Image (tube, rainbow, N blue to C red):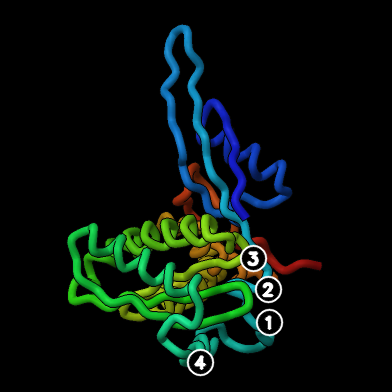
């Protein structure tokens, strides 16, 4: 679903959204709708649009045996292949919209359906310019994905999360984050020193949090402001 909130700063608007929706700040995506800089006689104003969804099933990992080494965690199973052509008017409109966005960026592409799930629809962008469309750490792909989710909401499907991928970047990135999470946890456990990871979007931070959630002597927390925050991994010792 989509909600709008207003505050004097981006942080105030996000804090208000988290409080009213009863969610952690990592559990929703934020779109900045309007920003007005304050002056001597005028207060600043920031309007944000919050996209919420059921996050309980995302990036969830099976609980690992305590005696099993962290590095032996099995890789994530790939999704089943689905019919790539749109099966209804909504999918056709969404595919056409996504292709138009990329073409207006100046790149030719084809867009198809990657997967269908009860709360998610995956789209795949095929282009000879895939590396540019993905961007550094997937930021361009994230921007295209955000536009696709906004458009899906305008078509009346706020309940559905749209995942936009290219060259299997999302799966490769998720697998890389899971490996990094376990390697970092081992380092923190060995040195007893906390580690601050690179800035990540909300979905990527959830992968780190949920991956390490069941490790009894490791703790994670998000730090920073805005959409791209960092996750700190800490050693807390065994619970008694």
Check residue 11 in the rendering and tell me which mark sits there, or answer none: none
The residue labelled by disc 3 is 55
The residues tagged by marks 2 and 4 sit, at their Cα atoms, a distance apart of 27 Å
The reply to whether discs 2 and 4 touch (Cβ–Cβ < 8 Å) is: no
> Which is closer to the viewer, label 4 or label 1?
4
Q: Are marks 2 and 3 in contact (CB under 8 Å)?
A: no
Residue at 68% x, 65% y: name it: 237
Q: Residues within 10 Å of mark 4 (few under 14, many from 20)?
A: few
Q: Does dot 3 land on a helix, a strand or a loop?
A: loop
**Residue 220, position in %: x, y?**
60, 60
**Residue matched to label 2:** 214
Residue 112 image position (x, y, % from top left): 37, 80
Callout 4–callout 1 Cβ contact below 8 Å: no
- Indicate left or right for 190 with 197 as reference: right
Which image quadrant is residue 130 in? bottom left
Quarter occupied by the C terminus:
bottom right
Q: Quadrant of the N terminus?
A: bottom right
The location of residue 214, given as percent across then percent down, is: 68, 73
Q: Residue at x 54, y 57 (%)?
A: 153
């Amino acid at each position: 679903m989509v909600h709008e909130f207003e505050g004097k700063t981006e942080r105030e608007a996000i804090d208000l959204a988290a409080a009213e929706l009863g969610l952690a700040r990592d559990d929703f995506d934020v779109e900045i709708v309007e920003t007005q800089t304050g002056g001597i006689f005028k207060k600043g104003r920031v309007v944000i649009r919050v996209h919420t969804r059921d996050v309980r099933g995302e990036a969830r990992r099976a609980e690992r045996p305590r005696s099993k080494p962290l590095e032996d965690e099995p890789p994530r199973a790939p999704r089943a292949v689905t019919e790539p052509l749109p099966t209804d008017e909504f999918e056709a409109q969404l595919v056409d919209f996504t292709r138009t966005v990329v073409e207006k960026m100046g790149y030719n592409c084809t867009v198809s359906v990657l997967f269908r799930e009860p709360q998610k629809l995956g789209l795949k962008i095929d282009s000879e310019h895939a590396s540019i469309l993905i961007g550094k750490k997937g930021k361009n792909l994230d921007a295209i994905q955000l536009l696709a989710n906004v458009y899906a909401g305008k078509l009346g499907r706020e309940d559905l999360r749209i995942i936009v991928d290219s060259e299997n970047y999302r799966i490769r990135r998720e697998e890389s984050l899971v490996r990094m999470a376990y390697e970092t946890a081992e380092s923190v456990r060995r040195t007893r020193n906390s580690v601050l990871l690179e800035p990540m979007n909300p979905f990527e931070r959830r992968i780190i949090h949920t991956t390490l959630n069941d490790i009894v002597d490791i703790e994670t927390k998000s730090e920073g402001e805005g959409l791209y925050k960092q996750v700190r991994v800490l050693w807390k010792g065994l619970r008694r």
